[in-house]
Amino acid sequence: GSRQHTTMVSADALAEVATAVAGGSPSSGGSPRGGSGSRSSLRPRRSKEREGETVEGPPPDFRCPAAQPPPSFRCPLSGELMQDAVRLGDRSFSSASLRGRGMSTWRPHTLLPKADHVLRSQVHDCLCERYASVVLRLRMVSAVTSAAPEAAAAAAAAAAALEAHDGAGKVGIAVAGGIIPLVKLVSCDGDATRRAAAAALAALASHPANKREIAAAGGVRALVAMLLAESPEESKAAACEAIWHLATGSGENRALLVQEGALPPVVALVSSQVAQSAAVRVLRQVAVDVEHARRLVDAGVIHPLLQLFIDASPARVDASEILWSLCMEPTSREAVSAAGGASLWWLYPSALPGL
């Protein structure tokens, strides 16, 4: 009879990956089809049938093919995976989808949504299985950052960043434990690895459920340190992108950014052609809280923002929002006026109130 498809990662394949990352070389002995020796490929191998015979070949990606989420795991309203599933009547929905559609609390108790713990557990297990191999690579390279080749670490972080752009990946990589190794990779020595890890954290931080966990794992401090280090502007732009996602909709993270000293390096990037857009968006989020106005002024944000108007930069739209927020605080409004902001009043009257 024909052989069945192999969908689970074998123990000897995982051992070979760990040996290669640690700097060793896999043994060449043994049969290529599962003998006593190690396998010659770093990727898990699976069997597939072609014209009646079984041949060996690499899987299309690092996810477990058997762990694809079934349609019943997706919310019928939003199409997203229901990791926060609630039961309403005889169907399950995502709690966030119901809140977004104005589910009010005046409904009778029998019509209120209740947590569907069984479905939540099933979705959790499915995500862990689907992204286990992606997170495994991250854990191995982050555990031996000094011994692992930079190419291997950068590839692992880039694979996580690619998967995190998918809606399921944003949740699945976090659920499977990928946040902590990504934060460690942001603090490593290789610039390519840091940039890829920052891009992965930016994708994960775009999901509201991951913002607090990334901050708790030290992600804010690691990203700020990346801005303070001698790094190319492309890497600093990636760090600013991640910081912007962390700050959006999270007052706690915005306060943590100010506390960690993120404002001076971000203000310095306003004059950068590469990181200007991301830096201004970060400052716009920080300026949402009026209590941070004086800290922004002390960091020297006014003159670079006014220069954006002179240069007709596309970022001047966000700059006008920052200046508007600064003018809500009396002392900061005086600083904007003294720096020449009053001369822009006739061009952008809504941006600089009270000047």
Image: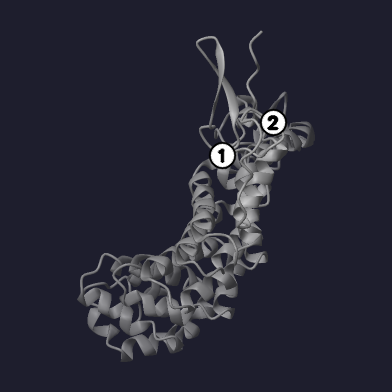
Residue at 68% from the left image edge and 31% from the top image edge: 8
* Left or right: 63 in relation to 333: right
Q: Which residue is drawn at the image coordinates 31% and 89% (left, top)?
A: 339
Task: Identify whether 105 is placed above or below 239.
Answer: above
Q: Label 2, on which residue?
A: 35
Element at badge 1? loop
The image shows residue 85 at horizontal and vertical percentages of: 69, 37
101 to 258, vertically: above or below: above
Point out the image quarter for the C terminus: bottom left
Q: Percent x, y for residue 137?
A: 61, 50
- Across and down, in percent, residue 332 comes to 43, 86
* Quadrant in which the N terminus is drawn: top right
Distance from label 1 to label 2 (Cα)?
14 Å
Q: What residue is shown with label 1?
A: 41
Q: Secondary structure at mark 2?
A: loop
- How far across and down, in percent of the image, does residue 39 sit? 62, 37
Q: Is residue 138 visible?
A: yes
Residue nearest the viewer, comparing 71 with 75 = 71
Please state which of residues 103 and 179 is positioned toward the viewer in this rendering: 179
